[in-house]
Image (spheres, rainbow, N blue to C red):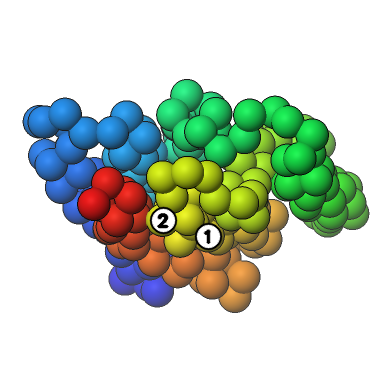
Amino acid sequence: MNSQIILEILYTVAAFIATFIGTFKYFRKKSPLFLQMVVCMMGCRFFNGLLDLLLVYSKMNMDTFTVSSLVQLAQFLFLICANIGALDHLCDDGSKSNRKYRIIAALIPLLIYGVLIWYTIYDEFNAAEKFMLLIAVPVPLYSLYYHIKHLIIPDVEGGIIRTIRPFNAICILNCVAFFAEYTFKYGSIYWYVAVSIEVFVSIAIIPVLTHGIKKWSA
């Protein structure tokens, strides 16, 4: 068993444990919708890892954009919905005073997108891979926008933004790891670093978020 498969297994097991515990704890009783969305996000990561393992054992080229990649993208849709539906309106009322934070939070994803466009055009991706990568990347970039904004925007009455800033920092790290995993070659040193970060995210994200929610509601 090579080190790539071992790392894929660690990623899958970590996501499964987080999904199982999160489902058991936060769907059996009334819990914040935001937290339940993050558990659903972890479910996407588990299925992504499971599909990746099946693809590896079937000896498929892992540098292509597969159904596994689409499942992993779904995790960012849960985060976007959670931010739009349960959090963003609490910290940003759309006023001019918060405009600079919205601009900063938007400029960083746009800059990353520009770099990724340049990289995929000049690297050895075929036309189909370039197309899939460039239409898929805006999803995590949109999620990244909210996490950056909620990390830098001033706290509001009640303290919810301050207490979950570590969660947003972890989500930013997760977005960056996703970009690295899908732009660098499978099995490269960058791939190892990216997936190692994703294992850490799977282990840490729910405990960090629940700790922040407990501090806010205490």
> Which tag, 1 or 2, sits closer to the chain's start?
2
Q: How many discs appear?
A: 2
Mark 1 to mark 2: distance in Å?
12 Å
Horizontally, residue 127 falls left or right of residue 164, namely right
Residue type marked 1: Ala
Vertical placement of 161 versus 127: above or below?
Answer: below
Residue identified by numbered label 2: 163
**Are the residues tagged 1 and 2 within 8 Å (C-beta)?**
no
Quick check: 48 left or right of 97? left
Q: Could you tell me residue 148's position as x and y percent?
A: 64, 51
- Point out the residue furthest to the top here: 85
Task: Please tell me whether mark 1 or mark 2 is closer to you in this view.
Answer: 2
Which residue is located at x 62 percent, y 35 percent? 92
Q: Is residue 140 left or right of residue 74?
A: right
Front in this rendered view, residue 92 or 39:
92
Point 33% across, 68% down: residue:
6
Q: Is any part of residue 14 visible from this angle?
A: yes
Query: Which of the two residues, 4 or 205, is positioned nearer the viewer here?
Result: 205
Label 1, on which residue?
A: 169
